[in-house]
Image (cartoon, helix red, strand yellow):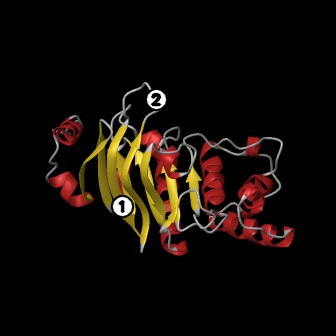
Amino acid sequence: MTALEFSEVRFRYAADSPLLLDGLSFRVEAGEFVSILGPSGAGKSSLFRLMNGLLAPESGKILVGGASVSAKQSRCGYMPQQDLLFPWRTVAENVGLPLELGRQSHSAAERKERVAEVLSAVGLGDWAEKSPLALSGGMRQRIVIAMALACSPKLIIADEPTTALDVTIQAQVLELMKNLKEKYDTSMILITHDLGVVAEICDYVSVIYAGSIVEYAPVKDMYETPGHPYTKGLFNSIPSLD
């Protein structure tokens, strides 16, 4: 089953502005961990907003699990670049927010049980009644992962989720994401510009450049034989230990 499909998607921010995406097509199959890699301004964050319905395409189709991204059947988990936790809500109340606002109705008891489950899954079961202000950056990112899992999505989209973390904490968060993907049998899309992150956890790499997917390949193939000039330049910019 296809987790996400873009079909001939065209998008621009205003009627008199140039097309940012012109006939973009790609898909992510169930269970895959795909990275979308590209330079600033290539359209990565716009893709993120289109995937979660915050923006609407000018034309084309965006399907999640075979249903339109705007349909009630569409279930995605989202990890934005900043954690955006509400300081006046406890950790548990922040994690439960997607269940409160979601398209599926949950009783208070069901919400409490699900929140406890995902907090335990990210290793923060003892922090449920704490304020987000009491958490470190890495712990806050774990809360964002728990929020993304709360509604039992089949697709999780992460927009540069480790950008503000130091290397040690970043590795822990990435490993957690990889393990939870397997545990909950979800597909994941990671939007990033960090080659190290891509090599660590992704199965496939999709390179976006000037609003188009210019290259798509398994991670190993991409690292060994990059094809597009941008991809080659990106790899050539990595400092050599020699």
Residue 118 to residue 47: above or below: below
Q: Kindly tell me whether residue 201 is visible in this rendering.
A: no
Say which residue appears at 73% left-offset and 70% top-offset.
114
From the viewer's perspective, tell me whether residue 104 is left or right of residue 30. right
Q: Residue 93 falls in which quadrant of the image? A: bottom right
As rendered, which of 77 and 62 lies closer to the eye? 62
Instruction: Name the residue carrying label 1.
Output: 27
Q: Position of residue 158 (x, y in %)?
A: 50, 51
Q: Position of residue 112 (x, y in %)?
A: 81, 67
As rendered, which of 153 and 235 lies closer to the eye? 153
Q: Kindly tell me whether residue 211 is visible in this rendering.
A: yes
Crowd band around label 2 with a 10 angstrom C-alpha radius: few (<14), some (14–19), many (20+) = few
Instruction: Name the residue carrying label 2.
Output: 15
**Badge count:** 2
Q: CA distance from mark 2 to mark 1?
A: 27 Å
Crowd band around label 1 with a 10 angstrom C-alpha radius: few (<14), some (14–19), many (20+) = some
- Kind of element beneath mark 2: loop
Which one is closest to the eye, mark 2 or mark 1?
A: 2
Residue 187 to residue 207: above or below: below
Say which residue appears at 37% left-offset and 58% top-offset.
34
Mark sitting earlier along the chain (2/1): 2
Disc on res. 55? none
Amino acid type of disc 2?
Ala
Say which residue appears at 37% left-offset and 33% top-offset.
19
Residue at the limit of the structure toward the top, as seen here: 16
From the viewer's perspective, tell me whether residue 47 is left or right of residue 109. left
Residue at the limit of the structure toward the right, as seen here: 108
As rendered, which of 131 and 79 lies closer to the eye? 79
Amino acid type of disc 1?
Arg
- Kind of element beneath mark 1: strand
Locate the N terminus and report the quarter of the image it occupies.
bottom left
